[in-house]
Amino acid sequence: MSEDITLPIKALRNDIELPSYAYAGDAGLDLRSAECYTIEPSQRVLISTGFAIALPSGYAGLVVPRSGLAVKHGITVTNAPGLIDSGYRGEIKVSLLNTSTDSTFVIEKGDRIAQLVVVPVPQVNLVVCNELTETQRGEGGFGSSGVRA
């Protein structure tokens, strides 16, 4: 079981709803739009959430798409997952893409547009070497295991 952390959050506007979990045990906090937007077909937009956070050192925030928006409307996070480093203190914004080629999508202020997942991240110490350990997979990638068993 994971350990709870405290996440300082600062509202940058007084008319927004702060992130929250929809259900007990959810992994992602729902992020809401601070403004109204219309996303045209194939358009990317950067959406304000109206808040900033102070992630503790050793943690990162991942901004991920909401499955319902993706499946029902073709709305996804452009750089999924979006990465928030622990040193960042600016407003959290969400880069959304309308993958539809023929339908606009309207976002109202307060609509849930993405999710924030906070994860621990170790600092990596690189060790330069001439050879890497052998594995069964080796250099196989990009579909090397096939589609069907």
Image (spheres, rainbow, N blue to C red):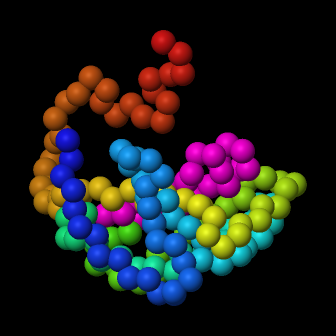
Looking at this view, is 110 or 134 the one in front? 110
Residue 110 sits above or below residue 30 on the image: below
Q: Indicate the position of residue 52 as horizontal and vertical percent values.
A: 41, 79
Residue 7, image quadrant: bottom left
Q: Indicate the position of residue 146 as horizontal and vertical percent values.
A: 50, 22
Q: Indicate the position of residue 20 as horizontal and vertical percent values.
A: 44, 61
The residue that appears at 39% across and 31% down in the rendered structure is: 140
Q: Is residue 56 magenta?
A: no
Residue 25 sits above or below residue 16 on the image: above
The residue that appears at 54% across and 21% down in the rendered structure is: 147
The residue that appears at 47% across and 87% down in the rendered structure is: 12
Looking at this view, is 42 or 148 the one in front? 42
User: In which quadrant is the N terminus drawn?
Assistant: top left
Provide the residue span drawn in magenta: 60-83
User: Does the image show residue 145?
Assistant: yes
Residue 137, image quadrant: top left
Q: Indicate the position of residue 104 as horizontal and vertical percent values.
A: 82, 61
Q: Is residue 129 left or right of residue 29?
A: left
Looking at this view, is 101 or 20 the one in front? 20
The residue that appears at 62% across and 55% down in the rendered structure is: 76
